[in-house]
Amino acid sequence: MSNHNRAEMRQAFDDAIRLTEKNRLTLRVPHGMKPVQNKRGMHYHYRPEIFLGLQGWTDFSFPRESFRLGPEEICVIPAGVPHGETVHAGAPDKPFRNLVCGFYNNTLSLHFAHEARPAKPDIEVIEFFDAPNLDVFLTLANSLAQTHSMHSPARDSVLKGLQLALLGLFRNIVETGTGQLNSDIGKVFQAKCLVREQFANSDLCVQHIAEVLGCSADYLSHLFHTETKERLTHYIQRIRVEGAILALETTKLTISEIAYASGFADPAYFARVFKQHKAMTPQEFRARIEAHRVQQEDQPKTVYYDRLDFTHGEPKPKGTGKMPKAS
């Protein structure tokens, strides 16, 4: 990201903060719905996503509703909520442009989105920031989405405070975020974050990632393998399998739905790749999880912060096989 892009990002957050202070930044949040559904033409993320409207319009579609996001508006899409996007310029001299925020492990991404093809948004430039306090960002984003659906007397004041805090944190990280990685290691890091962000996209491939990062596919593949000792194609598969495992553990989606939601265009191919990585099929993996869950739920137990205890009555002290004596 160039100095000009970073300055534009700072200005976008400054403007959003001023609008919030004047109660002029409209918050849009989709209504409550069952998360992590596989819907044709839609995708979802495992963490919240935030869109700040700059120019033009974004038409968001959700399983049960749709709305339009424009300038002086911000949208929070909760984790797991399926959505589709089509975009439009505001005027011939005002092409579509959004600022989009995503979250990963100890990392957040900020990117400008533009109209790459008619009505289709894509990343124009992207920056990744170390965020050891990522839980604070996530708590604020989740609280914004939850508070938006409330009808309490102080709702508007709470929303304003949460919004100012979140925008201020974004503004600070743009100002203070450092690029301590050299350019080559940085491309590997950026490639990893792009894969984690877009693994559900079945069109994601080495060529697409290289185009976003402004280098050749051969160069990126060689660099990635040299730095990580893993081929980029294998890494893409591994992250997709990790996403599938999370869905197998936490959702009731069918195996085919999980395959599509994890970026596999063919469920049979997904099953083969999954078995290569986990030495069992997705069906076997889910059956093992279910059997373990049923076995534990059928047993009387006491749940502690660091363990489960399956004795009746008081738990056994750690490291002994005896029950504690009554005092």
Image (tube, rainbow, N blue to C red):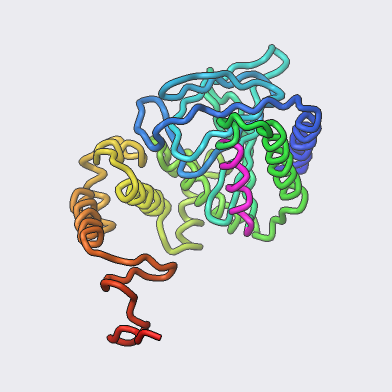
Q: Residue at x 57, y 32 (%)?
A: 150
Quadrant of residue 1 within the rendered picture: top right
From the image, which quarter does the C terminus lie in? bottom left
Looking at the image, is 235 positioned above or below residue 99?
below
Residue 111, image x and y in percent? 63, 38
| Residue extending furthest toward the front | 327
Frontmost residue, 2 versus 214: 2
On whether residue 135 falls in the magenta region, the answer is yes
Quadrant of residue 71 within the rendered picture: top right
Q: Residue at x 29, y 39 (%)?
A: 253
Residue 215, image x and y in percent? 56, 44
Q: Is residue 139 visible?
A: yes
| Count of numbered badges drawn on the protein | 0
* Chief SS of the magenta region: helix
Frontmost residue, 100 versus 162: 162
On whether residue 283 falls in the magenta region, the answer is no
Q: Which residues are magenta?
A: 132-145
Q: Residue at x 32, y 43 (%)?
A: 251
Residue 192, image x and y in percent? 50, 51
Q: Residue at x 67, y 15 (%)?
A: 90
Left or right: where does residue 179 sit relative to residue 68? right
Residue 175, image x and y in percent? 77, 49
| Residue extending furthest toward the top | 92
Q: Is residue 280 visible?
A: no
Frontmost residue, 84 versus 286: 286
